[in-house]
Image (cartoon, rainbow, N blue to C red):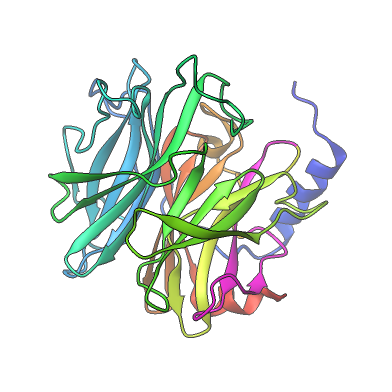
Amino acid sequence: MEETHPQQATRSRRAHTRAALLQRVGKGPLLAPTNRWWEDLAVYNPAAVEGADGVVHILYRAQGKDRVSRLGYATSRDGVTIDHRSPDPVFEPELNGTSEQLGTEDPRLIRMGDTYYMTYTAVSFYRTADPHAEWIPSAPPSWRVRIALASTKDFHTFTRRGVLLPHMDNKDAVLFPEKIRGQYVLLHRLPPDMWIATSNDLASWQDHRVVLRTRPALWDEHKLGAGPPPVRTPEGWLVCYHGVDHHTVYRAGFALLDLEDPSRILGRSSEPALEPQESWEMVGQTPRVVFPSGMVLRGDEVYVYYGGADSVVGVARGSLHAILASLRAI
């Protein structure tokens, strides 16, 4: 039987006594593996964005027995019921290229006009001559992990726009859904913190600086990273992010960034808004994980789409008013 650390047990008891900001919708996962060869092992870490027609478009990471990550596609009109699910992957790695031999992982989506932009993690092998100085500690040392960008208008045909930060291993990259002061803005993750950068053209990025740091003795003490792209609210940019403690439990919380200067933090969750409790969040490829990666705002309702234990897709819902009220001023 797995030993429970006293601090972990205290956090678990606290989770059951406080009112959760996000409530799971339904009695089980929103999406689970099927018998199709490319997604019969796991489906998880979904991107979600609402189209101009009110449909929620979902791209999710899928793995079959070959363990290569491809992207599946589903839609939902009410945000919690799947209306359509593609029988085939809509985005696959370029196995003959240099950036994606091991897969395309963990998409995030924004909509600008009639175009959807997708950031994702491109995973490949380092060549013998490549430096490993920027290696992410959580990945095998031979893996090359980069942030890449693609765009689409219909979720069937995608245009690859290349690797965004070619000289560093990186993950958890999200674009803001609009320009700020005439520039594109990106959140990304160099362990263990969340960083921010700006660009004039979506190709060259500068002004890199830390925006959100880990906090000792809290749920995000070990490392953290951006979840879904930020959502504009009257109070500021709402950021949902994952935090990891020293027991490798992944939880979800929120931060609020200034609308005109998103490097400025206005508020932050002192307690997680969602943490693993259901069996499909506690047991899977990576146990004890909720990994938020999609968020849709409809009126006062916030829908958060997340991966459970690196195996399934879940959705939780909460009140925007309550979430904003919960954020501790910085």
For this rendering, which residue is in front, 14 or 330? 330
Residue 244 at least partly seen: no
| Image x and y of residue 212, in percent | 65, 60
| Image x and y of residue 199, in percent | 40, 62
Quarter of the image with the C terminus in it: bottom right
In the rendered view, does 143 fall on the left or right side of 164? right
In the rendered view, does 108 fall on the left or right side of 115? right
Residue at the (56%, 21%) spot, across then down: 140
Q: Is residue 46 magenta?
A: no
Outermost residue to the bottom: 234
For this rendering, which residue is in front, 257 or 148? 148
User: Is 178 placed above or below 64 here?
Assistant: below
Quarter of the image with the N terminus in it: top right
Q: Quadrant of residue 297?
A: bottom left
Residue at the (50%, 80%) spot, across then down: 259
User: Is 133 placed above or below 151 here?
Assistant: above
Residue 176 at least partly seen: yes
Q: Is residue 270 magenta?
A: yes
User: Is 73 placed above or below 101 here?
Assistant: below
Q: Which residues are magenta?
A: 247-272
| Image x and y of residue 11, in percent | 77, 49
Residue at the (50%, 68%) spot, across then down: 318
